[in-house]
Amino acid sequence: DGGITQSPKYLFRKEGQNVTLSCEQNLNHDAMYWYRQDPGQGLRLIYYSQIVNDFQKGDIAEGYSVSREKKESFPLTVTSAQKNPTAFYLCASEVHGTWTEAFFGQGTRLTVV
Amino acid sequence: KNEVEQSPQNLTAQEGEFITINCSYSVGISALHWLQQHPGGGIVSLFMLSSGKKKHGRLIATINIQEKHSSLHITASHPRDSAVYICAVRSRRDDKIIFGKGTRLHILP
């Protein structure tokens, strides 16, 4: 079955360490997105990619980095420069611009201690 | 002021009640989406609307483009409907997706 997979579901890291969150899709979608969700706030866009080897900053890109070497994969690295990394991170994909079939992953809850 | 506002923020109701969740937006849009987020965090897409009304089982979504308003209705609510419901719009101006903060629904048995 086609879908979008995020791993791991829960992640703990020590302050100052970089950590990479995985997002893989087998839907042949061109566009992939990373969102951050904090309590009481709407989803906020971190980075997005419309095609392989290209990505754009979203509203809150500082302290994050991404890559898009393959169509299926869009990993997010939370760097030590991110001031408040503890959050719930969601990955999404779509056939760009249509949003008729936007798929979301199950999310990764990152806790930095 | 947020570009997408949802009301209420929290809603607790008894099983069987008719539920309405509202979404108002201030930008021109090409589409509006209703999403459901369960306690585990995963999000499921319920509806995509650009006009009119859609129905799926006990869920009904309506949109009024002129008034920049959408509603999500749940008939004969059930405890398994307990979730956060999120309204999101795609801005016509820059194609950006803007999310509401969500409505937390709790249906009591």
Image (spheres, rainbow, N blue to C red):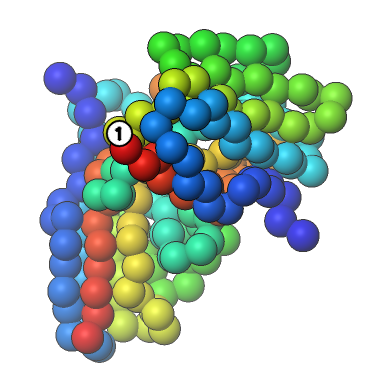
Q: Amino acid at mark 1?
A: Arg
Q: Position of residue A32 (x, y in %)?
A: 38, 40
Please indicate whether residue B71 sits to the left or right of residue B13 in the image: right
Q: Quadrant of residue B61?
A: top right
Closest to the observer: B12 or B6? B12
* Image quadrant where one finds the N terminus of chain B: bottom right
Q: Position of residue B20 (x, y in %)?
A: 60, 32
| Above or below: residue A2 compared with residue B82 | above
Instruction: Please give the chain letter of the residue carrying mark 1.
Output: B
Residue furthest right as drawn: B66
Q: How many numbered discs sit on the rendered protein?
A: 1
> Which residue corresponds to the image point at 35% horizontal and 75% vertical from the top-left?
A85
Kindly identify which residue carries mark 1: B80
> Which residue corresponds to the image point at 51% horizontal and 63% vertical from the top-left?
A40
What secondary structure is marked by label 1?
Answer: helix
* Image quadrant where one finds the C terminus of chain B: top left
> Which residue corresponds to the image point at 17% horizontal and 55% vertical from the top-left?
A9
Please indicate whether residue B28 sits to the left or right of residue B17 in the image: right
Q: Quadrant of residue B87?
A: top right
Q: Position of residue A36 (x, y in %)?
A: 42, 59
| Above or below: residue B101 compared with residue A10 | above
Closest to the observer: A61 or A15? A15
Q: Residues within 10 Å of mark 1 (few under 14, many from 20)?
A: few
Q: Is residue A65 visible?
A: yes
Q: Is residue B93 visible?
A: no
Q: Position of residue B10 (x, y in %)?
A: 53, 52
| Above or below: residue B77 compared with residue A22 | above
> Which residue corresponds to the image point at 41% horizontal and 12% vertical from the top-left?
B57
Please indicate whether residue B91 sits to the left or right of residue A57 in the image: right
